[in-house]
């Protein structure tokens, strides 16, 4: 009654890594891989239920396959018994985070290159009984060594004793589970990245129907010893729905709105929040789109009730004319991508884009994308052209626009003060802001 | 001397230097290989596979490591490499930890297939269990318990027992995690494992305590009685555990609370000042789990939400909504699951979701299941305040390329019109607009929704005064006028049916103003024209439309049997239908033809002879035909409502898939009274001084006072913390507590009547026990010991009038009581 194991599939649906499914028949993982691939094939536009019910050959032994996508890899977790799928997804997210910390970029190449490390990690994080065991990266780093040049050299040179984790201090000895013992740095520094995502929906009339800013404070901690930090944020009164890394003392937060914590070593996400502006004014969406999409039939046949069949086979033509204007006055919008799904019947696109922007049409996903690498302040871009279609054109009802803004935060959240107790040195702190937008613009 | 030392040092240094140089140069050569080697392990030629055996037997660690990596790569590719088992087992004691780890991975996969060879490795693991490094100890236990060889079961029990008392919490955690594995291998060890679990439950470290929960759930999920003494401590340590344990423990504690704690009393609606009565222990659970709403692990947040949903009094329940809404943005997978949970929540707490309606707006890139659940949720949150916004959203969704979403959205508009009377006008406008759409789905759904709206409102018309401009009849006439624009066959058929069904009621109050030039008597003005149009294009219609056209012709004819035009039209339609290619249409024509035989004076078929031939049987009168055609229609049902399984528990897999799993999560209903709270009291409950902490300290003088002081007047003494005590001793204790209130003579008088009552109560007790046993499965034999205790306790709780039963209990108890009783009196 738990997570039975983990399977990682390459982009072609073949397993790369497979944990040992000990208490299940050998066909069990294959059953899940097949069920997943079959479901993926059937799904339209990659819309596949993340929780798949998998029938079993045996009576009354059905199971469930939870899966997530990461890059072009798929992570599958077969589950039997009554387990909250959220538990499974949380585990997969944790495991993917751990993997990316160990391997950097996760792809089928890096996985194949370091498969021994991946297997060791799997062994440590997922107990054979199906429950996550050690998932704090700090504790894991003591047990499974990250694949580094030095480590490879030492182990190959036969000086294995040096490579053994014992050299790094006793694993399993730290009294704080998320922080390892005896960390030493020459330069004591801690960095905070405040990353915010604007998720908004804009109606046809240009007014936003929903706006939400979700923020995250990522930290990279390189502090010696066991520092106890106290972080004061400016603008904290506008943060709602916060969630924290386990190291944060929640009672302190609910009392004083201060973050008091002993940080783990290395990278971690300190907190996540939702920003709501205190005043009446809403969050301004930093761009504006004027879209003119017209759908018309190319043939001018008179329509009557009896021509219903005839209509279905006639070809149609659509014209699209989009203008995108940046509303920012000082900064530029980077990597602006506007996408529009044109419907299954779309066959070809012919567009003209203004300077510094490019468009592409993916005939497999039937999606028109418009890329603007960098949109300077108050600049304006235009894309226009025609869409060909076999049947009546039926495009998506909204553009999806994504963009980045560097050195900017919607919430204007600032780190006011960082106090440290428990150690004597003075740490260097750095703060960065970054924002991402994901806007659905209805036309 | 110093020079000599220096000499040796330099010598060593140079030697080490050259050695390092050699190895490094060797390594860089190797390294060029290893850069690509990761993948080369995967695509290795067959002869290298054969070489693995030699590599494993070689003395060089590097060779061995290389061989092991090759093996793991082969395993990963799905190849069975159990043939190397013997060679691999030899390396189980390797000094190189990395080799050893890979050996472990291999061993765990193939030990079951080669039990005899696997036994060879047992010794090494047993030795490792005494290693000074906790990592080695934990790892040894993990492998030992993972080797699925039933033969070594008792060895593993010993190992677990040993590790359960290990000084390192990590090793104790490993011990706890090993328990379920052993249990699934051989359930005969259950009694021993339960002892280990109950010992581990006393653990102070949150790290290991969390894993004990896993063991508990696997081995003895029904033995909630083991948790009494640990309940409060578990609640308090909850916040310090790791995230996975928090989720597991919350599930367990939720079940415990439902089984063992009294139901929170809800403040009555009339008297709001009266506070809700919530048990102290339940309060403790809720207050200690509430901070975990801030966890960054969605599973933990969900577990807290579940605890609140099923345990908290109404005033607290509302806290679960904002955290769940927060989860929606984490990832599409989490969103998909949480939305389904929110649907369950919305069954009882829909008003709480209303302020969050914007979170359920459908985005174009949502996956199918998310769209479906969001639409369901949006339906449930429609209210008089937000219907404007929601209607606008629904109307927008009707443009979506996804047919299912379009259908859901249009149905939602209908739903909105039904439940919010003010929105009717707007909804109908939108629906009428959809009828002119280019897209089949939009038109079809709009017509279907309109149809059900019209029907429902006609049904209700007796009750509700129709005040709105869009009366049902007006809608039908509107549809009738637009029959040309409605091209989708299903929608056309639907309109034609509507026209026929309601053509008979030209309400004078509404249609009185219309000019009736050339109107057919008894039929609404718009109806004959629909028939005319349908008849004109009859040949080109789909079969469904043809069927409805025939029915329409018949209905109109019944309503106005003398109209010449209608007879001609009906005759035309029936003759065409009679020779139709589709046999359903031919059948219908024949049926209708014979049904109408008695309605009109003129025959419906040009060749009268044939007509008379057919209608030789019973000929129905007009009123009868009317009954046949118009009455007995099905009641309209609400469309598009997904009925939820009422038994689905929040945050269970069943609520997602809608199907049973091997062991469904099941939450029993509350016990009305709950078990006695003093069972949960322990020595370290310092803040409750009025509590009897141990048997020895309970002097007869202090006991009654403490009982009087406690909120419940049920005198029960807790189970002593050190092992199960003989049942008699503490029943005697309780009686000792009763002592001062009761005269001995009185007692003897009462005891006789008491006996009979007790017997009844005994039966009750038995029933209770039976129920408990029903809830749990398995583990009944082992329970017997504890059950006896419980029985005793419950008796004590319940018979307050006659707690003493000479001879009823063991001799020891009576003796003990009498001595204490005497001392009280003296």
Image (spheres, rainbow, N blue to C red):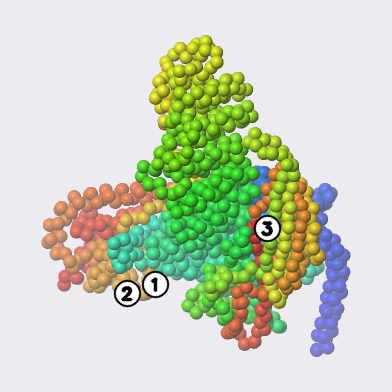
Is disc 2 in the same subunit as disc 3?
no
Contact flag, marks 1 and 2 (Cβ < 8 Å):
no
Q: Are marks 3 and 1 on the same chain?
A: no
Q: Which residue extends farthest bottom?
A: B2
User: Of A349 and A423, which appears nearest the observer?
Assistant: A349
Which quadrant is the C terminus of chain B positioned in?
bottom left
Q: Quadrant of the N terminus of chain B?
A: bottom right
Residue B438, quarter of picture: top right
The percent coordinates of residue A277 (x first, y second) are 56, 73
Q: CA distance from mark 1 to mark 2?
A: 11 Å
Badge 3 marks a residue whose secondary structure is strand
Distance of label 2 from label 3 (alpha carbons): 67 Å
Q: Quadrant of residue B14?
A: bottom right
Percent from the top left, x then y, of residue B567? 51, 23
Q: Secondary structure at mark 2?
A: loop
Mark 2 crowdedness (10 Å alpha carbons): few <14, some 14-19, many ≥20: few
Residue at the disc numbered 3:
A399
Comes first in the chain, label 1 or label 2: 1
Chain letter of mark 2 equals: B
Position of residue B407 relative to residue B309, above or below, is above
Q: Is residue B119 left or right of residue B71?
A: left
- Tell me how far mark 3 sits from mark 1, CA to CA: 62 Å
The residue that mark 1 highlights is: B684
| Residue B234 in view of the camera | no
Residue matched to label 2: B689
Q: Tell me, for residue B344, which label it has, or none.
A: none
**Count of marks, rendered view:** 3
Neighbour tally class for label 1: few under 14, some 14-19, many 20 plus, Cα within 10 Å: few
Please provide percent x and percent y for residue B12.
83, 78
Q: Nearer the viewer, residue B278 or A48?
A: A48
Observer-side mark, 3 or 1, equals 3
Q: Mark 3 belongs to which subunit? A: A
């Amino acid at each position: 009654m738990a997570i039975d194991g983990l399977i990682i599939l390459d982009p072609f649906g073949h397993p790369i890594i497979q944990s040992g499914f000990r208490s299940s028949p050998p066909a069990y993982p294959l059953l899940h891989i097949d069920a997943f691939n079959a479901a993926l094939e059937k799904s339209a536009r990659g819309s596949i239920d993340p929780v798949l019910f998998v029938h079993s050959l045996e009576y009354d032994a059905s199971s469930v396959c939870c899966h997530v996508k990461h890059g072009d890899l798929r992570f599958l977790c077969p589950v039997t018994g009554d387990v909250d799928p959220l538990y499974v997804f949380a585990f997969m997210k944790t495991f993917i985070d751990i993997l990316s910390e160990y391997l950097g970029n996760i792809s089928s190449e890096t996985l194949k290159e370091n498969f021994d490390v991946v297997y060791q990690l799997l062994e440590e994080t997922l107990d054979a009984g199906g429950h996550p065991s050690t998932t704090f990266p700090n504790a894991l780093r003591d047990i499974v060594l990250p694949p580094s040049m030095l480590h490879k050299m030492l182990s190959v040179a036969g000086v294995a004793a040096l490579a053994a984790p014992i050299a790094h201090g006793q694993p399993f000895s730290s009294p704080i589970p998320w922080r390892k013992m005896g960390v030493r740095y020459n330069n004591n520094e801690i960095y905070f990245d405040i990353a915010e995502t604007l998720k908004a929906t804009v109606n046809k009339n240009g007014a936003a129907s929903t706006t939400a800013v979700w923020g995250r404070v990522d930290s990279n901690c390189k502090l010696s010893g066991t520092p106890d930090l106290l972080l004061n944020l400016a603008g904290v009164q506008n943060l709602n729905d916060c969630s924290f890394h386990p190291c944060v003392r929640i009672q302190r937060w609910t009392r004083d709105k201060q973050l008091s914590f002993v940080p783990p070593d290395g990278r971690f996400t300190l907190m996540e929040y939702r920003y709501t502006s205190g005043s009446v004014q809403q969050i301004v969406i930093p761009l504006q789109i004027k879209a003119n999409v017209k759908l018309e039939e190319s043939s001018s046949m008179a329509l009557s009730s009896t021509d219903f069949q005839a209509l279905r086979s006639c070809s149609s033509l659509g014209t699209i004319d989009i203008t995108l204007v940046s509303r920012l006055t000082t900064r530029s919008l980077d990597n602006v991508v506007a996408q529009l799904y044109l419907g299954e019947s779309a066959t070809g696109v012919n567009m003209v884009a203004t300077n510094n922007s490019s468009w592409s049409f993916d005939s497999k996903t039937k999606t028109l994308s418009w890329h603007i690498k960098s949109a300077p302040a108050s600049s304006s871009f235009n894309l226009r052209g025609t869409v060909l279609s076999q049947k009546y054109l039926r495009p998506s009802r909204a553009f999806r626009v994504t963009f980045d803004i560097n050195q900017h935060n919607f919430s204007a959240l600032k780190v006011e003060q960082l106090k440290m107790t428990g150690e004597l040195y003075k740490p260097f702190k750095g703060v960065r802001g970054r924002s991402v937008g994901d806007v659905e613009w209805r036309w | 001397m110093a020079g000599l030392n220096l000499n040796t040092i330099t010598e060593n240094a140079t030697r080490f230097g050259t050695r390092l140089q050699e190895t490094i140069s060797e390594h860089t050569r190797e390294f060029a290989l290893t850069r690509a080697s990761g993948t080369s392990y995967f695509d290795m030629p067959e002869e290298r596979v054969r070489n693995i055996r030699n590599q494993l037997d070689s003395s060089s660690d590097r060779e061995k490591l290389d061989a092991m990596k090759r093996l793991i790569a082969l395993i990963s590719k799905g190849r069975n490499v159990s043939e190397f088992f013997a060679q691999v087992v030899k390396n189980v004691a390797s000094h190189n930890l990395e080799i050893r780890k890979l050996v472990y991975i291999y061993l765990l996969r193939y030990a079951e297939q080669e039990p005899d060879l696997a036994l060879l490795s047992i010794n090494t693991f047993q030795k490792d269990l005494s290693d000074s490094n906790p990592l080695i100890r934990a790892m040894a236990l993990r492998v030992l318990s993972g080797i699925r060889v039933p033969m070594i079961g008792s060895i593993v029990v010993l190992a677990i027992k040993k590790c359960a008392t290990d000084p390192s919490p990590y090793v104790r955690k490993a011990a706890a995690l090993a328990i379920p594995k052993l249990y699934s291998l051989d359930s005969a060890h259950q009694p021993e494992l339960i002892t280990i679990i109950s010992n581990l439950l006393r653990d102070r470290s949150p790290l290991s305590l969390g894993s004990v929960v896993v063991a508990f759930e696997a081995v003895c999920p029904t033995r909630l009685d083991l948790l009494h003494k640990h309940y409060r401590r578990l609640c308090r340590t909850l916040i310090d555990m790791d995230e996975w344990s928090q989720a597991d423990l919350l599930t367990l504690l939720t079940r415990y609370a439902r089984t063992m704690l009294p139901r929170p009393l809800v403040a009555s609606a009339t008297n709001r000042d009266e506070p809700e009565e919530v048990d102290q222990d339940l309060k403790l659970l809720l207050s200690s789990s509430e901070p975990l709403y801030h966890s960054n692990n969605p599973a933990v947040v969900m577990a807290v939400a579940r605890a609140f949903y099923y345990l908290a009094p109404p005033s607290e329940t509302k806290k679960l909504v904002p955290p769940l809404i927060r989860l929606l943005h984490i990832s599409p997978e989490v969103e998909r699951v949480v939305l389904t949970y929110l649907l369950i929540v919305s069954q009882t707490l829909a008003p709480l979701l209303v302020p969050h309606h914007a979170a359920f707006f459908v985005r174009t890139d949502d996956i199918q299941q998310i769209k479906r659940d969001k639409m369901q949720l949006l339906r449930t949150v429609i209210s008089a305040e937000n219907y404007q916004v929601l209607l606008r959203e629904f109307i927008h969704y009707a443009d979506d390329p996804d047919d299912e979403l379009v259908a859901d959205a249009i149905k939602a508009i209908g739903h909105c019109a039904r439940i919010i009377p003010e929105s009717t006008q707007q909804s109908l406008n939108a629906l009428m607009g959809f009828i002119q759409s280019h897209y089949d789905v939009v038109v079809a759904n709009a017509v279907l929704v309109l149809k059900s709206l019209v029907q429902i409102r006609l049904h209700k018309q007796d009750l509700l005064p129709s005040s709105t401009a869009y009366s049902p009849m007006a809608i039908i006439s509107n549809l009738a006028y637009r029959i040309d624009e409605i091209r989708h066959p299903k929608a056309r058929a639907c309109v034609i049916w509507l026209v026929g069904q309601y053509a008979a009621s030209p309400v004078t109050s509404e249609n009185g103003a219309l000019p009736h030039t050339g109107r057919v008597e008894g039929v609404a003005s718009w109806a004959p024209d629909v028939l005319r149009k349908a008849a004109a294009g009859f040949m080109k219609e789909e079969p469904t439309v043809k069927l409805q056209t025939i029915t329409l012709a018949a209905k109109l004819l019944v309503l106005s049997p003398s109209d010449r035009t209608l007879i001609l039209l009906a005759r035309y339609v029936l003759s065409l239908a009679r020779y139709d290619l589709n046999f359903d249409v031919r059948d219908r024509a024949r049926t209708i033809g014979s049904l109408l035989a008695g309605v009109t004076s003129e025959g419906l078929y040009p060749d009268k002879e044939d007509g008379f031939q057919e209608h030789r049987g019973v000929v129905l009168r007009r009123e009868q035909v009317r009954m046949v055609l118009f009455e007995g229609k099905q009641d309209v049902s609400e469309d598009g409502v997904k009925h939820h399984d009422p038994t689905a528990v929040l945050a269970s897999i069943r609520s997602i898939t809608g199907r049973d799993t091997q062991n469904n999560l099941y939450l029993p209903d509350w016990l009305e009274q709950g078990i006695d709270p003093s069972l949960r009291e322990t020595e370290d409950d310092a803040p409750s001084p009025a509590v009897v902490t141990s048997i020895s300290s309970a002097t007869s003088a202090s006991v009654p006072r403490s009982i009087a002081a406690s909120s419940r007047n049920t005198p029960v003494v807790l189970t002593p913390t050190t092992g199960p005590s003989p049942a008699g001793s503490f029943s005697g204790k309780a009686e000792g507590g009763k002592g001062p209130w009761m005269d001995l003579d009185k007692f003897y008088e009462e005891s006789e009547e008491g006996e009979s009552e007790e017997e009844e109560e005994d039966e009750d007790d038995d029933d209770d026990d039976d129920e408990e046993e029903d809830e749990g499965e398995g583990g009944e034999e082992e329970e017997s010991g504890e059950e006896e205790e419980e029985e005793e306790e419950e008796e004590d709780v319940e018979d307050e009038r006659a707690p003493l039963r000479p001879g009823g209990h063991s001799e020891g108890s009576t003796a003990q009581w009498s001595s204490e009783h005497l001392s009280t009196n003296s």
